[in-house]
Image (cartoon, helix red, strand yellow):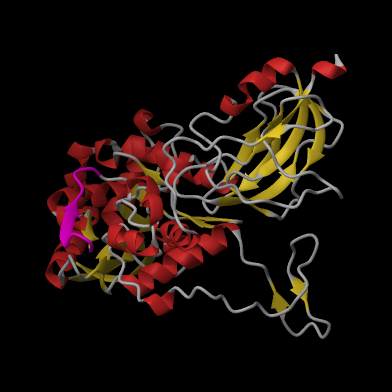
Amino acid sequence: MEDQQHVLEFRLPDLGEGLADAELVSWAVEVGDQVELNQTIAEVETAKAQVALPCPFAGKVLELLARPGDTVPVGAPLIRVAGAAEDAATERQSVLVGYGPDSEPKSRRARGAGAKNSAALSDSGIGGEGLARTENAPGRPTAVPAARKLARELEIDLAAVSGTGPEGAVTVEDVRRASGARVEAENLPIHISPPVPTMRPENGMARSTPAERETRTPVSGIRKRTAATMTISARDIPQASAFVTTDFTGSMELLDHLRSTSAFAGLSLTPLALIAKATLVALNEFPELNAVWDEANQEIVTKHYVNLGIAVATQRGLLVPNLKEAQTLSLRDLCREISRLAETARGGTAALPELTGGTFTISNVGVFGVDTGVALVNPGEAAILCLGSIRKKPWVHRDELAVRWVTTLGLSFDHRLIDGEQAARFLASVATLVEDPLTLLGRV
């Protein structure tokens, strides 16, 4: 019955991994629609992935509280639904598994005129009187806005940071100590200069000036995240690079042979998979390249597992999903998992845990026709390997000039924990393995 229904409000859940907001991409429902439990109501894009949001209760859509293109903070209201009384009794727990409302939700203007202040649910009827505020999620750390911003940039879990501010709040200095980032105070200005006064286009598309001599494009989503991460990399990590050009003919012949076997039937066996396997073998020999510099404690943390990142170019920007515990994977497993990661990344369906926690990255720039590249090291890692294009070239083989498959490998590394000698030995090891890939057969 109508008088038994309650106003239920769904807030943007905590999407994890230090993400504090998301951009609303599209609505899958309209005002007046009837929604079922766990029905997808919207798609949002975080700095890492595109996520479908299911509604944690059933009912009739009363109000959409954000427009496509809006950036919605975690904990801010998204939608109001007229639901059954039994849904109201459990609404506070009816958020996505592993998610929870923000402890300090920011107020947002509702889509319709005269919208009421946001609240979690109505304890009375649809009239909206007596709305109750959502209780703070237990255990969620309190932090000042500037600290949250820096934590997002540095990929720091605030739950692991000890706060020294009022009532235990996490401050900027707390985040700096936790991350080891040497950031001067002037690099984090409190007062932000106002942007160039331009009207944002309604559809979020790039806008041309009247003279059409330049275009201004709002920065958001993956591009915004990439910009922040690369700024941290260039600013905080002293980097150097090394290169080696190697004969890839043996690897190409091995790949051709393996493709004809039943063991690799139906798999996409590419040079990247073989390079990945060689890299994993070399990392086992040179574990110092699978490490990270801990500035706060003045320690080098060596990882005894490899979460191998594979750079993937998507329509939304560059993503680097990683293969967890890659050191345990066979060549067949690598073929399968690299294909899967690339597919989910390009489709915007990569799981958030797969987009964080990498320990070493490979970037296959050769697919774009370039010989090699100088990549920036991902914060939290020690090095990144670039695979250049594989071409037929004149090459001295067994003291004779021959046409061989040749490629150039480029390694960028954090010079704080890796010396040139270590980098060169690691790179030479990878080159030797692909020159004589039969040494990998026992590890396929």
Quarter of the image for residue 176 reads bottom left
Q: Nearer the viewer, residue 168 or 162?
A: 168
Q: Is residue 339 visible?
A: no
Left or right: where 216 falls relative to 150: right
Up/down of 52 relative to 372, above or below = above
Magenta portion: prevailing SS class: loop
Q: Quadrant of the C terminus?
A: top left
x, y percent for residue 297:
18, 59
Q: Would you say residue 283 sits in the magenta stretch? A: no
| Residue range highlighted in magenta | 295-305
Q: Nearer the viewer, residue 308 or 8?
A: 8
x, y percent for residue 206:
73, 69
Quarter of the image for residue 289 reads bottom left
Q: Quadrant of the N terminus?
A: top right
x, y percent for residue 12:
62, 41
Q: Name the residue rendered at 81%, 32% in the picture.
A: 61
Q: Nearer the viewer, residue 417 or 159?
A: 159
Q: Name the residue rendered at 69%, 49% in the picture.
A: 25
Tally of numbered discs? 0
Q: Name the residue rendered at 52%, 42% in the picture.
A: 15
Left or right: where 414 falls relative to 140: left
Up/down of 36 relative to 12, above or below = above
